[in-house]
Image: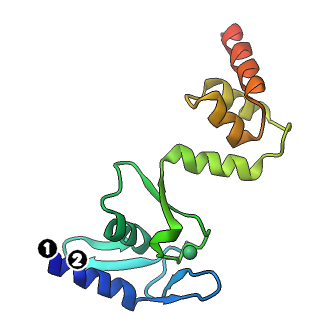
Amino acid sequence: MTVAKKTLHLRLVENMQVDSETSCWNWTGYILPEGYAQFNLSVAEGWVRAHRKSYELFYGAIPAGGHVLHRCNNKRCVNPLHLYVGADKDNCADRIAAGTQRGKLSPAQRFDIAISTLTPVELATAYGISTEYVRVLKRKHRASV
Ligand SMILES: [Zn+2]
């Protein structure tokens, strides 16, 4: 098992180039059309996402349903220090946070907040609004059902 792991580490390192400015480990192997690094692991496992493999190698198994995300926003990067595991909803919250301006929620967003299972604090952070406003939206929604 150790031998196989070592080989994998070696292959990972052989297929990347360190960017001295960003310290990203840029994958030099095959890149998917959508920009993710691909790694042909073995006949049994086939092609895997290189950044997921890197995460597993350095930190251990990825929790079920977890997504390995990039702090550096560089899909080609396989630097374990730039990777973290998030759930689907984190992905979603990141997207919302990036695309939402404070105080400008669409009706669909207000509905999402009202029915979300996230805590008011998480929602407030994700949408850039106050926790009090989150509670107001939830109260309004409950009253309307
Ligand atoms: Zn990076």
Q: As shown in the figure, which amino acid type bears the numbered disc 1? A: Met
- Relative to 4, is 16 on the left or the right? right
Ligand 1, by image quadrant, is bottom right
Q: Residues within 10 Å of mark 2 (few under 14, many from 20)?
A: few
Q: As shown in the figure, which amino acid type bears the numbered disc 2? A: Lys
| Residue occupying image coordinates x 35% and y 51% | 63
**Which residue, given by chain and number where applicable, does mark 1 sit on?**
1
* Circle 1 SS class: loop
- Relative to 45, is 127 on the left or the right? right
Q: Are marks 2 and 1 in contact (CB under 8 Å)?
A: yes
- Choose between 46 and 127: the one closer to the eye: 127
**Which residue, given by chain and number where applicable, does mark 2 sit on?**
5
Q: Is residue 94 above or below residue 117?
A: below
- Choose between 44 and 81: the one closer to the eye: 81
Q: Position of residue 3 (x, y in %)?
A: 16, 81
Could you tell me how far apart the alpha carbons at marks 2 and 1 are, in whole angstroms?
Answer: 6 Å
